[in-house]
Image: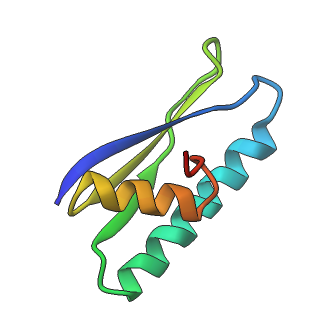
Amino acid sequence: MSRHLAELYLPKTSSDDLREAGVCARSAAEAMIREGKPTRYLRAPFLGDDETCFQLYEAGSPELVLVASRRAAILSSG
């Protein structure tokens, strides 16, 4: 498995949103593992000045990260 990033915007004042995004990302990845889709959520570096958060995954493909991110409502489907 290789490592992949999913990027999302989070305002500086939303530490609860950062925690919630991590919980949702981890839950989505764990569900995918149960389905036989190798996807593991690792952590979320947050660049506060840029209001950018990177969700770091270990996954079998970039497509699996997109699926996990969409399930976690981190990325839109568009």
What residue is rendered at 53% in x and 70% in y?
A: 28
Q: Where is residue 64 in the image (x, y as percent from the top left)?
A: 33, 62
Residue 24 found in image quarter: bottom right
* Front one among 70 and 58: 70
Relative to 17, is 53 on the left or the right?
left
Residue 36 found in image quarter: bottom left
What residue is rendered at 69% in x and 43% in y?
A: 18
Furthest residue in direction left, as rendered: 1
Relative to 66, is 60 on the left or the right?
left
Q: Where is residue 26 in the image (x, y as percent from the top left)?
A: 52, 65
The quarter of the picture where the C terminus appears is: top right
Identify whether 69 is placed above or below 33.
above
* Front one among 27 and 43: 27
Q: Position of residue 38 (x, y in %)?
A: 27, 73
Relative to 43, is 17 on the left or the right?
right
Furthest residue in direction front, as rendered: 78
What residue is rendered at 46% in x and 76% in y?
A: 30
Identify whether 54 is placed above or below 76.
above
Q: Where is residue 9 in the image (x, y as percent from the top left)?
A: 64, 30
The number of discs equals 0
The quarter of the picture where the N terminus appears is: bottom left
Identify whether 39 is placed above or below 14.
below
Furthest residue in direction top, as rendered: 49
> Is the image coloured rainbow, by chain, by secondary structure, or in one colour?
rainbow
What residue is rendered at 38% in x and 87% in y?
A: 35
